[in-house]
Image (cartoon, rainbow, N blue to C red):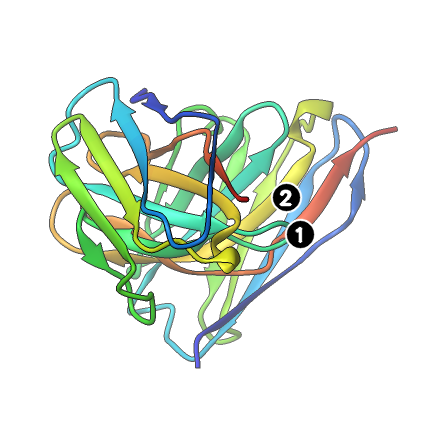
Amino acid sequence: QVQLKETGPGLVQPTQTLSITCTVSGFSLTSYYMQWVRQTPGKGLEWMGFIRSGGSTEYNSEFKSRLSISRDTSKNQVFLKMNSLKTEDTGVYYCARVYTEAKGGYYFDYWGQGVMVTVSS
Amino acid sequence: DTVLTQSPALAVSPGERVSISCRASEGVNSYMHWYQQKPGQQPKLLIYKASNLASGVPARFSGSGSGTDFTLTIDPVEADDTATYFCQQSWNDPFTFGSGTKLEIK
């Protein structure tokens, strides 16, 4: 069955870089887009960006300057890296599989359990 | 960005019908989706493209709407439906979520 699991540090210092890994099973990364969404106390759920089945990426302009999404298909892993962290980046970070149709048809059919990240010195 | 507006909270009794609304600041065609999030859990897809029931979701859940006004309906409500419900649009860039409606079962 489809499973997604995020792993990452619980605590990151301000100005440092956040790195989270999403390990998937039950489907191929070359057949589905994968995305990152975060949930923060200040802004709720925010779509951060996705990596397409072909490997290209699309980012929310809110994060574009400091976010990178990549993958290793041989290991069934998707990666999030975000630099210049601030306390407002504290929240739960989720990876999710994207079901895609024609223009506009992007919805998130499977989610990981999420990883809580606290940005604090 | 497309702002999705939801009422913050609702309280209903088991067996009743409840409608949760989501209004978009600009048209999103039919590309509105609904998720359920229980405390401490990840969101779960309920409805996609306004009115399509996701796999495994009970038929008590239904969705309607197009353009800027959308509704998620639960009929009848059960105690296990206690959760926060989010709408999400995928027509305009960037994808955005509503702030959620917290449903309490009395």
Horizontal side, residue B53 vs residue A35: left or right = left
Q: Chain of mark 1?
A: A
Badge 2 element: strand
For label 1, the crowd category at 10 Å Cα-Cα, with few meaning under 14, some 14 to 19 and many 20 or more, is many
Quadrant position of residue B70: top left
Tag 1–tag 2 contact (CB < 8 Å)? yes
Tell me which residue sits at (41%, 25%) in the image: B7
Nearest the camera: A84 or A87? A87
Nearest the camera: B77 or A112? B77
Horizontal side, residue A78 vs residue B62: left or right = right
Type of amino acid at the residue the image marks with label 1: Val
Q: Are marks 1 and 2 on the same chain?
A: yes
Badge 1 element: strand
Which residue is label 2 attached to?
Answer: A92
Tell me which residue sits at (62%, 49%) in the image: B39
Quadrant position of residue A104: top left
Which residue is label 1 attached to?
Answer: A115
For label 2, the crowd category at 10 Å Cα-Cα, with few meaning under 14, some 14 to 19 and many 20 or more, is many
Quadrant in the picture for the C terminus of chain A: top right
Quadrant in the picture for the N terminus of chain A: bottom left
Horizontal side, residue A109 vs residue A80: left or right = left
Question: Which tag, 1 or 2, sits closer to the chain's start?
Answer: 2
Q: Position of residue A13 (x, y in %)?
A: 81, 32
Tell me which residue sits at (64%, 28%) in the image: A41
